[in-house]
Image: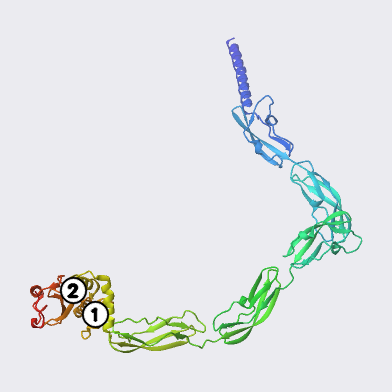
Amino acid sequence: MKRRKGHIKLIILLLLSVEILAVVGLLAYIQTRPMVVEAVTLEAGTGTLKVEEFLMYKNRKGSFITDVGKLPLDQPGTYEIQIKIGKKIHTSSLQVVDTIAPTATANNLMVLKNEAVEADAFISDIVDATKVTASYLEKPDTSVPGDKDVTIILEDKGNNCTKLKAKLTVLDIKNEVTVEAGAPMNISASDYVNNDKYDVSFITDLSKLDTSKPTVHKIELNVNGRTVTGNIKVVDTTSPKASFTNQETWQNEAVEANAFVSNIVDVSGVTIAYKTEPDFAKVGDQQVMIELKDDYGNMTEQQVKLTVLADTIPPQILGTRNKTVYIGEGVAYRKGVSVTDNKDQGLKLSVDSSAVNLKKVGVYNVIYTAEDLSGNKATVTVTVTVIKFAVTEDAVYDKADEILSDIITSSMTKLEKAEAIYHWIKAHVGYTGDSDKSDWLAEAYRAMTKGEGDCFTFYAVAQALLTRAGIDNMQVTRLGGKTHHYWNLVNCGDGWYYFDSCPNKDHVETFMLTDKELDEFAKTRGSYYYNRDKSLYPATP
């Protein structure tokens, strides 16, 4: 009895386990079962997508994760679609197919003989969701006039095809008439006709066409009441025209080919070149062939003469002359001198004046030289004569009067005039340490014009200015010592005083000094600086 009860319990437990496993399995199936269809098929160009089309169970709700608004629904293809159902994302696919053949209207055409015509010219009003291409089943021959049956094949992106039939009439008239660029366009509608069975006239206004340069103008013609297209081909078959002139050049100087050519006439651009490059090193005449070629290959050749000249003539140096100058004066060697040449411009002129000594009396040679680019050389020799400067008393006093007019007035006393002269000399004459002590007039003039000299020069200019100012004066000369020194004695109406305008290293004023003051100053400079024979000069106050 106990064993029996145990079996019953075991059976109950087994039954319960089976039920539990069934429930668990059912729950697992519910969790893993597909919620969207594997794929949805859509005819290209037929509309929009709805999420319900992708759901396995119509009682469930879902939303697109994929932005289906951006999908090319008019292009055949397979596109992945993601859909969210509850908290899970499921993947399906969209297959866009094109199974509908295109439709269109076939039109009959009329063309000119030998005119090219594409298949799509026969077709209009195409209806299809995808792009459609047109092709011939058999391409018509437009070289043979007459009516021809044409079959056009329309094929879309889904490889769906439609065959349409049309009629092509090939007219026995020319497709193209040629005219020369730049010439009057003397053509008529009858130029397109091969026989007189066609009534032909222009629809296009030919007067508005530009025929000045090569091009192709598409025009319309009325042929027996129907409009057809044709061409006017503007061509350039005319060689360039121009004027040609012979040319000369110097040896080894090249001349461009275009130098021989002028007055070019052509409807396009023209290039100018030598057929064979000339020999510019060869002196004499040579025949040269010039080629003119326009943009359309038309060419003109012309033989011309090139003369190559040898330059054997040296330059000319103009304006040279012998010069006479005073000792110490400068010479403008290039002033008024120029160089000319039968060929070259801007030649360099060299001047050799190295032999000239402007500080010494004598006659010296100056050599002018110029050389042209061909090596021809010209040389001119002139003389520079250096003489001793001779100045007249009138010249010195005229210059002195000119200076005095700027520094003194008639209302001044003689002393004031003497002081003005003293300060003018101090300000305008510099010490150089040299002078011609044999000619006081020359040194006075030198001081007034060049502002330089030594103590004799200062004495001389002071004598000239004081004399012309009406002030008595005399020369004073140093006695003894290794060098000479010169200065002045002046009398402004109240006795004689010493007047020395020459600069001294002590920068002491030496104007209107007495014998005593002069001797005191001499002690600081050395006993010989103002040493003099006092018996030769009047005593000072």
Q: Residue furthest front?
A: 411
Name the element at disc 1: helix
Give the spatial CA distance, label 2 vs label 1.
16 Å
Depth check: give the residue in front, 54 or 118. Answer: 118
Depth check: give the residue in front, 221 or 530. Answer: 530
What residue is rendered at 56% in x and 79% in y?
254
Mark 2 or 1, which is nearer the eye? 1
Q: Determine if residue 170 is in view.
A: yes
Looking at the image, residue 263 sits to the left or right of residue 410; the answer is right
- The image position of residue 44, as x and y in percent, is 73, 39
Q: Determine if residue 450 is in view.
A: no
Q: Quadrant of the N terminus?
A: top right
Q: Quadrant of the C terminus?
A: bottom left
Q: Verify CB contact (< 8 Å) between mark 2 and mark 1.
A: no
Depth check: give the residue in front, 439 or 41. Answer: 439
Q: Which mark is residue 444?
A: 1
Q: Is residue 460 above or below residue 27?
A: below
> In the image, what residue type sits under mark 1?
Ala
What residue is rendered at 65% in x and 75% in y?
262
Quadrant of the image occupied by residue 129 = top right
Looking at the image, residue 294 sits to the left or right of residue 396; the answer is right
Q: Is residue 1 above or below residue 495?
A: above
> In the image, what residue type sits under mark 2?
Pro
- The image position of residue 102, as x and y in percent, is 79, 44
Looking at the image, residue 256 sits to the left or right of residue 159; the answer is left
Q: Earlier in the sequence, mark 2 or mark 1?
A: 1
Q: Which mark is residue 503?
A: 2
- The image position of residue 484, as x and y in percent, is 15, 82
